[in-house]
Image: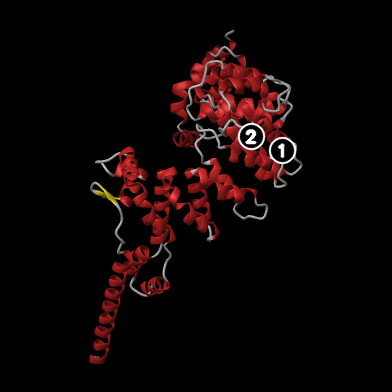
Amino acid sequence: MVELRNKGRWRRKLWALLGCGIAVALILTLWREREPRYGDRSLLEWIAITEHPDRDIDYSKKDAEEAIHHIGTNAIPFLIKCIEYRERPWQTRLSALCSKLPEKIAKPLSGLIEGHGAERQEIAFRGFYILGPDAKSAIPALTNLLTAQPPLPDYCMGVLAQIGGDGLTPVIVALTNQVSRNRFAAMDALLGLDTIRPLEQIVVSALTNCLADTNRELAFYAAQILCCHNSEKDLAMKTLIDGLGSEDKKLRRSAISRLKFSLRIGYSVPALLQFLQDTSSPLSAYSAGVLGGSARDGVKLPTTVLPALTNSLRDPRPLVRCYAASAVGDFREAVGRAAPALLDLLDDPDEWVRRSATNAFFDVSRFFVLKTYSQLPDGMSLEQREMYERRYGIRTLSSSGLSNLLDHPDPRIREMATNAFRKASGSNIVNQTSENHSRQP
C-alpha cells in the first residue's frame, strides 16, 4: 500500500516536471525578436489594429495604417522573418509531449505551440499589403518564396502585385508560364488590384494574351479582370459571351459567373439597362440578374430600373423572363406594382420561368400569407388547426394582411385571398364576408 502511494507521488512529480519543462520551452518559443515600434505600439500590434479596429479604443484603422507607414522600410526585415518562420522539429516533438498531459493543461499549451508561425505569417502579409509600393525592397525575398509550399506563393503573389512596378514581373512570369502551378494565384493577385487605378501596360498585354489561352477558365478569368479595369472590354466581353455557348457545362458555368462579376463591377446602371432592353443582346438576362442583386444588397437604384425589369417579364426569350422575374422579386415591397405581370407568368410554358415568377411573387411579405394558407392541409380538426396556427403564426398573419388582399384590384389576388380566408377559418360568418369581398368589382 505504501509502495503504491509512493508511485503515485513520483508520477505527480514527473507530470509537474514535464509541465515546467514545456512551459520553459514555450516561453523560449514565444520570445519575440525585437520588432520595430511607433509610439506606444509595436509593428504587429499596429497591424492587428488595422484588422480589428474595434478592439482598440485609442486608435482607428487609419491611425494604425499611418503608424505602419511611419515605420516604413524598417518593418521589412522583421516582416520577412515572420514570413520565413517555420515550426522547428523540437516544437513538433514538444507538441506531442503536450498531448500526454491532462487535457486541461495539454489543450492550451498545444494551442500556443502549434499554429503560431502561421498566424505571424498572415499578420506579416497584411503589413506588406499596407506598405504597398514602400515594400519594394522585399521583392527578391517574396519572389524566392514563390517556390514554397502553398499557401505561401498565393500570399506572395498578392503582395508583389500590390507593390507594383518590378513586383509585377514575377507575377506576369507565373501567369504566362503554361506549366506554372501558380497561374491562377497570379490571376487572384491581379484581381485584388484597385479597380480605380488603371492597369499597367505589362499587365494589360499579359491578360489580353491570356484571352486566347487553351485553358478557357483562365481565359475567362483574364476577361473578368480586364472588364473590371475598363481595359480591352470589347475583346474581353466577346471571350465571355463565346463561353456561354460552350458544350462543357463546367466551362459554361465559369463563363456565366465571370460575366456576372464583370457586369456588376465594370458597367454602370444605364449600360445594364441598355443591355436589358436590347432584345438581341446576349447580356440581357445577366444584366437583369445584376440589377436584382444590387437591389437585394440595398444599393439605391434609379426609379427606372423596376419598370424596365417589369417590361422584361414579357421578353420573348425564356431566359430573360426567368432572370427578370427573380430580379423583380429582389425589390421586395416595391414588387407590388409588378404583381400582375408576375402572375401572368404563372402559366408560362417554360418551367423555370414559372418557378422564378412564383418565388418572386410569394417571397414578398404582403403576399407571403397567401402561400402560407395555400399550404394549410385540408380536413384538419379544430385542435390541429389551432396547433398549426400557433406553430406558423397564421392567425397573426391573417389579422395583419390577409383581409386587405380581399379588396386588391387584381381579381386573381382577390380570388387567392378568398380561398385562403375560407381555408383559414371554419366560421360561416367569415366565409360570407370573404364571398362578399370577392363579388366586388
Seen in the image, is 31 located left or right of residue 405? Answer: left
> Is 332 in front, or is 67?
67
Q: CA distance from mark 1 to mark 2?
A: 9 Å
The mark nearer the N terminus, 1 or 2, is 1
Q: Tag 1: residue type?
A: Gly
- Visible in this render: residue 424? no
Q: What residue lies at 43% left-to-right and 27% top-to-bottom?
A: 396
For disc 1, the neighbor class at 10 Å (few under 14, some 14 to 19, many from 20) is many
- Visible in this render: residue 215? yes
Q: What residue lies at 37% left-to-right and 49% top-to-bottom?
A: 73
Q: In the displayed image of the protein, which residue is found farthest to the right?
A: 247
Seen in the image, is 428 located left or right of residue 5? Answer: right
Q: Position of residue 26 (x, y in %)?
A: 31, 68
Colour setup of the view:
secondary structure
> Is 206 in front, or is 60?
206
Name the residue beneath numbered marker 2.
259
Name the residue beneath numbered marker 1.
243
Q: Position of residue 214 (x, y in %)?
A: 73, 46
Quadrant holding the N terminus: bottom left
**Quadrant of residue 241 within the rendered picture:** top right
Q: Is residue 336 above or below residue 441?
A: below
Q: Position of residue 213 (x, y in %)?
A: 70, 45
For disc 2, the neighbor class at 10 Å (few under 14, some 14 to 19, many from 20) is many
Residue 366's disc is none
- Under circle 2, the secondary element is helix
Seen in the image, is 265 located left or right of residue 205? Answer: left
Whether pointer 1 and pointer 2 mark residues with C-beta atoms closer than 8 Å, the reply is yes
- Under circle 1, the secondary element is helix
Q: Tag 2: residue type?
A: Leu
